Image (cartoon, helix red, strand yellow):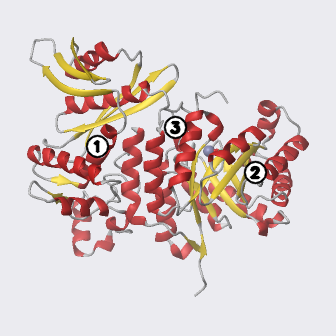
Amino acid sequence: MTQKEHLIIFDTTLRDGEQSPGASMTRDEKVRIAKALERLRVDVIEAGFPIASPGDFEAVKAVAEVIRDSRVCGLARALDKDIDRAGEALAGAAAPRIHTFIATSPIHMERKLRMTPDQVVAQAVHAVQRARRYTDDVEFSPEDAGRSEIDFLCRVLEAVIAAGARTVNIPDTVGYNVPFQFGELIRTLIERVPNADQAVFSVHCHNDLGLATANSLAAVRCGARQVECTINGLGERAGNAALEEIVMAVRTRQDHFACNTRIDTTQIVNCSRLVSTITGFPVQPNKAIVGANAFAHESGIHQDGVLKSRETYEIMRAEDVGWSENRMVLGKHSGRNAFRARLKDLGVVFDSEEDLNATFARFKDLADKKHEIFDEDLQALVSDTTLEASNERVKLVSLRVCSETGETPRADLVLAMDGEEEPGTAIGSGPVDATFKAIESIVNSGTILRLYSVNAITSGTDAQGEVTVRLERGGRIVNGQGADTDIVVASAKAYINACNKILHPRERAHPQTADV
Ligand code: KIV
Ligand code: ZN
């Protein structure tokens, strides 16, 4: 049997994923996701674009300082100021990588950069050399490679490899390529670039035609040994190739791939949930691998087949990607040790005994209201405790809502603003509207509500509702989350969480709105 090669999984959820409109993350949220990605055993975590804003710089720096088992990467245009900023942000990383890029397609060079091809080559080479001052691990991307001329691509790649790029990444920036042609592009580049053996060839595919995963896999068949992807396929416009699809396709169809990843696939569902909760981007039920229905069999014929022999209709095992078979995990009488052990299985490790105690107290409250506690409930509890633990200026003290047929709903609440309790009252078109108006009567956040969504965490009418609220002020976008068995309370928590983020001066601006 021939030895399989290693396929490098480069996760860009925290960078390209964050470029999904509205998917903004705070520094602490990025650190939480980065830790989950490290547990998933991704090889490289692209943590952000440090020049984009002081907040983005801080987020990359914070990720670089805590992650030890994955490489941490920062993005930089092929400009000295970007590269220096990335180098600075990554100074504390155990294994730093700088990823620098410049566009190479005729349309981008002429109309966006207004540069000649010679100038582009010179700038690319200079950028790689400058990045090498900070780390040996430099990656170069010819942006819009999918629409670039092949002779020019070969010239640029040869030059940047000679200048010290150890990874050359071929992005299909606008999602224009199709699998057979994209695979051939990679094969041709590897054959024609004279020093191709001195670099890893990588691919970065966007999903505008729904082909990001197929294009990436075609490239792997043709010699690419790094795939750039995101959890849940998050990313600019229609998104990037989904990490879970790439990893499970390579693993499930080993007969077609000469390589394998080092991913701990049992962490996939946890990561997917965490990213979905933090960004407020729900996972569609029929999404491959991580959708709620991905392993559900509805038709009688299928159910009968699976009961007789599961392989009749299942090509993967749900538990291999982290769906737990026995999902009812804890109840009212469960103790702290069982609670801690179950959360450890879910990849949650507490920083301190106080954090454990605070979450355990919430668990006991929830167990009083809800008979069966599922993994999803536990994850929401952890999120809620983390939200409360951060330095919040606004806290919910109490809430009373009156909603009656034929009457106008009314909310009366008390908030603690910077430690001072203040009452607020408002009427609204519904109980949630009244609650948000009552909060605004105290906070005056000056924001516009961009998204309100409620999702039942588990089934049953006693399920917790998980609410996401997206607020915008002056181009800055934040997402707030809240969970509770009472969805009006969950909504209030989510709104207050978003307000706390917008009121926080050190929170980062969204890269799309940053002036770089
Ligand atoms: O899509 C793209 O071209 C990118 C590059 C920065 C790699 O995200
Ligand atoms: Zn991209």
For label 1, the residue is 385
For disc 2, the neighbor class at 10 Å (few under 14, some 14 to 19, many from 20) is many
| 204 or 367, nearer to the observer | 367
Q: How far separated are the C-alphas under marks 2 and 3?
A: 27 Å
Q: Residue 20 carries which label?
A: 3
Q: Is residue 402 left or right of residue 321?
A: left
Count the labels in the image: 3
| 472 or 406, nearer to the observer | 472
Which image quadrant shows ligand 1? top right
Residue with the most extreme bottom position: 1
| 301 or 133, nearer to the observer | 133
For label 2, the residue is 131
Q: How far separated are the C-alphas under marks 3 and 1?
A: 26 Å
Q: Picture quarter containing residue 390?
A: top left
Q: Is residue 235 left or right of residue 110?
A: left
- Three-letter code for the amino acid on which mark 3 is drawn: Ser
Q: How far separated are the C-alphas under marks 1 and 2?
A: 40 Å
